[in-house]
Image (spheres, rainbow, N blue to C red):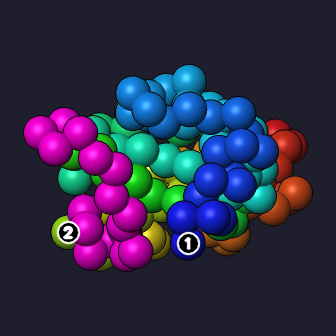
Amino acid sequence: MRLVVDHLLATTGIDLANGAGIPELMKFQEHFKEYIIVVFGGLNCDDIVFDEQVDSEKRINLPYDSVSKHYHVINNLTVAMTRRYVCRCNKGCKSGVAHRCQETCSDCMSVPPCSYANPVRVL
């Protein structure tokens, strides 16, 4: 495993000798273009520290523990946030049906919004 990590760091040019902050996260995001890397400062949907808004269904959710200065991995965002539904826009609520955002179609709730969202109405 150590060889894989060393190879990744050498490939990306990331130096973790002094830890990882936003510049290192940006380099990881640039390397892992097929993933959205989202870092939370706490276990609340509004505590986002890093989110580059990459267009992907694959996510890496990381809460940052400021006490131990360590990133963890969240396997299940809805459980970690104690919500029944967490949208890809990172808003949590009791039900996906009740949630409205730019990531979902206002008519059929498809993600991403379908081409028939917000039709022009003729008077």
The N terminus - image quarter: bottom right
Compared with 97, 73 (above or below) is: above
User: Viewer-proximal residue, 15 or 67?
Assistant: 15
Task: Answer whether residue 93 is magenta in the image.
Answer: no
Compared with 77, 91 (above or below) is: above
Magenta highlight: main SS: loop
In this view, which residue lies farthest toward the front?
Answer: 3
Identify the residue position indicated by label 1 in the image.
Answer: 1
* Number of the label disc, if any, that sits on residue 82: 2
Residue sitting at x 87%, y 57%: 115
- The image quarter containing residue 29 is top right
- The image quarter containing residue 4 is bottom right
Q: Kindly identify the amino acid type of the residue bearing the numbered disc 2.
A: Thr
Viewer can see residue 99: no
Compared with 61, 109 (above or below) is: below
Of the numbered discs 1 and 2, the one sitting upstream in the chain is 1
Which residues fall within the magenta stretch? 66-81
Helix, strand or loop for disc 1: loop
Residue sitting at x 26%, y 75%: 79
Helix, strand or loop for disc 2: loop
Position of residue 67 measured from the top left corner of the image (x, y, whole percent): 12, 39
Task: Answer whether residue 79 is magenta in the image.
Answer: yes
Count of picture labels: 2
Residue sitting at x 36%, y 66%: 74
Position of residue 123 measured from the top left corner of the image (x, y, whole percent): 82, 40
In the image, 93: left or right of 82?
Answer: right
